[in-house]
Structure formats: structure tokens, C-alpha cells
Image (cartoon, helix red, strand yellow):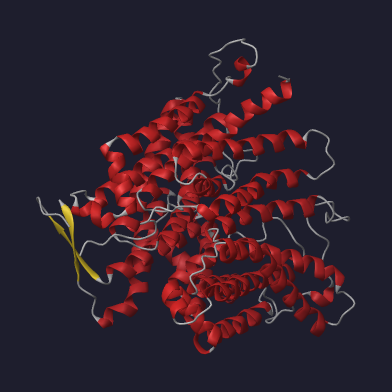
Amino acid sequence: MDIFLIGLIAATLRVATPLILGTLGELFCERAGILNLGIEGIMFFGAFVGFVVAGASGSLWLGVLAAILAGALAGLLMAFLAVQLGVNQHVSGLGITLLLTGFSLFSFRLVFGEPRVPPSIDPFSRLSPLGETPILGPIFEQYALTYIALAIVPLVWWALYRTSFGLQIRAVGENPEAADAAGVSVYRVRYAALMIGSGLMGAAGAFLSLAQLGAFTYGIIAGRGWVCIALIIFGNWEPIKVLWGALLFGGVFALQLRLQTSGLQLPYEVFLALPYLVTIAALTVAGRNASYPAALLKPYKRE
Amino acid sequence: MGLKIERVPAPVWVRPLIPIIAVVVTFILTAVLVVWAGANPLEAYYHFLIAPLSSRMSVLEILVKATPLLLTGAAVTFAFSSGYWNIGAEGQLYAGAVAAAWLGTLLGGLPSFAAIPLMIVGGFAAGMLWALTPALLRVKLSVDEVVTTLLLNTVVLFVISFLLNGPWRDPVSGWPQSPQIAESTVFFKLIPRSRVHVGLIVAAITLIVVWFIMSRAALGLRMRAAGLGQNAARFAGVNVERTMLAAALISGGIAGIAGVGEVAGIHFHLIEGISPGYGYTGIIIATLSGLDPLGVALAALFIGLIDTGAQTVSRALGVPAYLGDVVQAALLLTTLGMFVLQNYRVTLVRGEKRA
């Protein structure tokens, strides 16, 4: 296998990591019946909080933990609005994205002032558990968070389909009235799903600032949250299929990075836009047979 | 301890107070940030809300800020009222800005009275064009428009970056900005010694047309029917798909006009950060207005005040101007909550009882 392909596969896994984490996070929310459009802002907030905490404490892992907690806190707010009060999920989710983006930028100014170059940090180093093994060695030279993200996929599948908590999540996302009649606390399950899911989104953001970039920039998320929303539909709300979607997008993204330097006579913006256009195309193909969770977007009111 | 929630609608006299209560709650919540920034909240809110109203220049600046917001607010209101979730006003605004930058260098030979309307029509068409793909995917293939409009907001930024770093790069300065638009295509000033330009009149007229369509025209009636419930609307003989398509395209066009105003009235070339999120702010405005065009006017002026006030606070007290963004988003969430809470009485209960 040539060096180009090996590099491409390795980069795909790297680029896909925040998408896997973000998409699994959104999956928790949506399977419980809540569309969380706060994802873009929560990832931004996670990237920021993780960066600041890691910088202040000197521990990258503490930064990741803080990003997860920050995400869960944002999930709590989303749950209060969308579950407790039952307000419109589109608008409240976007509101949370705007709030957390504004809050992160406000805090950034207070902490870092107006630096000429984005502040940076010594990022996570990559692990190479397979050492110098040909082909697999360089492919699996990845950040610990990438391995964690890959391991979480089957874990989420197991949690959703093989545990009673997962059954409760799916029940409140499909038929909250029946779940309630069966003694499941719809509110409590939805709160939990939103907090767990948003915590994963926070981790996705921290991966970008603490591993992939080692810096915090204003454009660090650049629509990745919206891509995650699309990947869910593409993956038909199934954890394993969603993983393929994330790898596909990661692959296109990694490929465009390489095409930019390949000497192809096209403006680099064409390549930058490519993953987003591919996502829309994929939605068009897959979206027709999308089977949305039946109670998605419907607030549950126990009268 | 838990929350006990009962359905008890608020008395009628409370309803007009809801926006005011939401504003007060928002300012109490965001006071924490002001204190963190080392300023006195009361002093900050003086600079935020009162000081901008006390000088001629800043009052006029509120009108300048409100001009694109009136349009994006109207655009979002128009789409949302038909049940089409157009989150793409930001991208459609940029599409209109691109059209204005292009036409602005092309129509130099025409007199103003011909060039300016053509700029507006061009911006409307560009906004419509950018809204067309998600709208068609939605009505023909039922692809979720929220996702596609959001993704296209990111794509448009790459288009702009391509134009400004490639074919449109200013040949004189070498900066990533398009060549200056011709004199005759510039939106003339309404008020001397200010930045208030004719775009404000365009926005006002647009808002009146939107009000007319929504409340007096057959399309508006069909839109409202589709927005209230698609199946019921279909049963009543409304072609929901065509209605949504019309609402989506007109909405995109209106957002496109906002982009024309920013290029032709403020910057005179296309630059990368031409909108600090006016399209998303349009969603805030539409929500605050309760999807009512008159409410859009009030909300756009109020958000214009917050935008201007954020600059004033930043200059006077050194509080980062991003406070304005936080206040707007918090106001949105508080208002959403208030709309619901007005129908309920919430009481804290101690012990085992739960809602």
C-alpha cells in the first residue's frame, strides 16, 4: 500500500474523531426525542473550556474532563428549555449555540485579550501502539481520544440496545406517552440523554483545541456541528451507520487537504467546500428513507 | 425538592409585560459577566441602553444597525410562519452581497435611479438562488431544510474567500476585498453626517410588503395554514409544497437585499466579515416578534440598540463588546421561556412531590 493511501487513512481517522464524538452525542439527544441544535456552540464551548482549563492546570486530560462537564452543563440548560418548558427545539438549540459562542468569545477576550496569533498549547501526542509494523503502524499512530471515540461507538450501541437505560431513551424518543404509562420518567431520561450527549459534544470540541490544533481559534468548529446533525440523518440514527458517515466525511476532508497540495489547478476553497457539499449530496440520497424518531421535536407535556 | 407546574394562564394584562420581564431577567443574568469584566453592572447598563439614546450620532447608528436586521428578521419571519425552517438567512445575505459587489462594478454607466433598483433586484435574485437548493430538496425529496441551510451558510464563506483571494482581489490595494462599486450604485445617505442610507427605506417598504402578504394576501393565508399543520392545510386544499417553496424563496430574496444594503450602503466593496451574524440575529428577532412584522420592526430596533450599546460599553468600561451577543442570545432564550411560562404557574415544592 502506498504512502499516500496510508496517510489518507490515518488522517481520516483523525479528522473523523470530533465528528464521531459529536454525532454520538447528538444521537443520544435525538433518540430521546430532542433535536439539539446547540451542538455547534457546545463544541465551541468545549474547545474553549478545555483549552483554558488545560492551560491553567497544565493537565490536558483535566481540560478534556472540564470540556465534558461544560458540555453536560449546556445540556442541562437545553433540557430545561426543551424538556421542562417544552419550547421550540429549533430556536432554543440555535439560541444555545449563539449564547455559548458569544460567551466563549467574551471570555476569550477577558482571558487572552486580543492576541495577534491564536494562543497555543502543547497538544496531546500521538500513540503508536503498533510501533513500526508496516501499514498498520502508521495508520494507528493516533491520539488517545481517537481510540476512545472508536471504542465509544460499540459502547453506545450496547447502551442503546442492550441496557434498560437505552430502552428508556428509545422509548421516550418514540412514544413518550407509552413510556410514561410504563413508569418511565420521560423528563428524567431526556435530561440524562441531553447531558450525556452534550458532554460528548464538549469532548469533541476539546479534541480540536487540545489534540488536532493545539490552539484555540474563532473558526475552530467551522460548521462541524451542523455536519454531525446531517450525519445522524445519513446514518439513520444507528450508532454503527453513523460511524461510517463520520468516516466518509472525514475521508473527504482528509482527501481535500491532500488534493490542495497535489498541484491540481483548482482554487483551494473548492476543496474546503467539498466535504459540506458531499454531506448535502449524501443527505439527498439517504434522507428520503430517513426514519426520524417518532417523538423528535415534540415536547412532552404531562397534563 | 422539585418544581410543581400547573396550567394557569396569566391574566391578560400581563401579556404585554412579557418582553419587558424578559429584558429585565436577561440583564440580571448577564450582570455576572459585567462584574467578571470588572465593571459595575448599573453603570454598564447605563452605557448599554441609555447612553446610545442620548447622542444624535449613536441614535442614528442604531438605525444603521437595524437596517440589515429588519430585513433578516422579516426574511426569517416569512419562512418560519409557513413552517419552513430557513436557518440560512446568513448565507442568503452573503449571496446578495456578492450580487451587489458584482452589479456595483457593472452598472456604473446607469444613473442612480435605475442602478439602485437593479442592485436590489439582483440581490433579491441571488438570495433566492442560494435558497433554491435547500427549498427544492425539502419540497421534492423531503430533505431536512434545517441541516442543508446551515451547511450552505458555511459553504458561502468559502465562495466569498475564493472570490476575494482570486478573481475579485482589489487590483489597487491587493487586499482581499472586491473593487469599489460605482458611484451611481451607492445607496445614498438619508441623513447627512451619518451612515443612515436609503437601505433603511428599502427595509421599511419590504417589511410593509411582508406584512401585507402575511395578513392580506392569499399566499399569506396558505402559508399560515401550512405553518399551523401540513395535513390540515392539505385537507383544506392548500398545495403545501408550492406554498413552502414560495415562502422559502421570498425569504431568501429578502435576506439577499440585506446583503445589498451592507455592500452598497456601508462598505462599498465586498469584504469577508460583512455580516457579524445578521442572519442568525434574524432568527432572534423573528422569535422576539412572535412572527409578527410589526414586532420585527420593534425587535430589530431593540437589537440595534443592544449592538450599538455593546460598542459603547466596550469603549467606556472595557467590557468586551461580545457582551452584546451574549445578551441577545440570553434574551432569546428568556423570551422563549416566558412565552411558555405565561401559561403556567411554577411553584417550588419541598419534599417528595414532583411535577
Q: Residue furthest left?
A: B351
Whole-percent x, y for residue B25 in the image: 33, 64
* Residue at the image position 53 percent from the left and 33 percent from the top: A17
Residue B213: image quadrant is bottom right
- Residue B39 sits in quarter: bottom left
**Residue at the image point whose x is 57% and y is 35% from the top:** A247
Query: Residue at the bottom extreme?
Result: B216
In the rendered view, does B163 fall on the left or right side of B289?
right
Q: Is residue A240 above or below residue B20?
A: above
Q: In which quadrant will I find the N terminus of chain A?
A: top right
Q: Observer-nearest residue: A238 or A131?
A: A238
Image coords of residue A146 (percent x, y): 51, 27
* Front position in the image: B195 or B217: B217
Say left or right for A122 vs B108. left
| Residue A73 placement (x, y as % from top left) | 35, 45
Q: Which residue corresponds to the image point at 71% horizontal and 79% vertical from the top-left?
A: B189
* The C terminus of chain A: image quadrant: bottom left
Q: Nearer the viewer, residue A61 or B249?
A: B249
Residue B290: tell me if it is visible.
no
